Amino acid sequence: MTLLHSNLEKNRTFVQPNAFPPLPKNPKKQFAIFTCMDTRLVDFLEPAMGIRRGDAKVIKNAGNTVIDPFGGVVRSLVAAIFMLGVEEVFVIGHKDCGMASVDPPHLKAQMIARGIAPATHAEVPIRPPE
Ligand SMILES: [Zn+2]
């Protein structure tokens, strides 16, 4: 069984009719969190901040870094603020972030080894411009 099939099987038992009452799109607590995608934050950051489903918009990426001023993070924050009633944004980092120790040449070599086309890995921004 693949990881996907395993997760789909878990999902079938998780999703029951009417198990989750509908919630509004706007966050109840009117704030957004921009943080890292680190797995150690899953089911950790939200309870640490006292938020539950429907309370806040949570935006995650590798290293909670804005690299492109017109990229997905900014687009998500614009939508949150101007379309969904967000009034405050909290940027939350963490200790021992994996992105702090990324070696771009090594990462590029790994991508090449897996067959990623050179034109693709040349465009992957790892860190913000200095
Ligand atoms: Zn991180």
Image: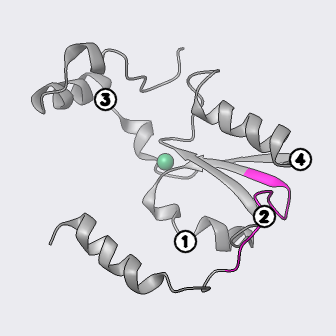
Mark 2 nearby-residue class (10 Å; few <14, some 14–19, many ≥20): few
For badge 4, the amino acid type reads: Glu
Task: Estimate the spatial distance between the alpha carbons at disc 3 and disc 2, rounded to whole Å.
Answer: 42 Å
The secondary structure that dominates the magenta segment is loop
Q: Nearer the viewer, residue 121 or 23?
A: 23
The residue identified by callout 3 is 103
For badge 2, the amino acid type reads: Pro
Mark 3 nearby-residue class (10 Å; few <14, some 14–19, many ≥20): few
Q: Quadrant of the C terminus?
A: top right
Q: Say left or right for 127 vs 106.
A: right
Q: Quadrant of the N terminus?
A: bottom left
Can residue 93 be spotted in the picture?
A: no
Q: Secondary structure at mark 3?
A: loop
Q: Quadrant of residue 29?
A: bottom right
Please state the horizontal and vertical placement of residue 9, each as a whole percent of the image: 30, 78
Per the rendered image, the range of residues in magenta is 21-32
Kindly tell me whether mark 2's CB lies below 8 Å from ligand 1. no
Q: Quadrant of residue 57?
A: bottom right
Q: Residue furthest front?
A: 17
Q: Which mark is residue 43?
A: 1
Q: Quadrant of residue 83?
A: top right
Kindly tell me whether mark 3's CB lies below 8 Å from ligand 1. no
Question: Answer yes or no: do the residues labelled 1 and 2 have beta carbons within 8 Å?
Answer: no
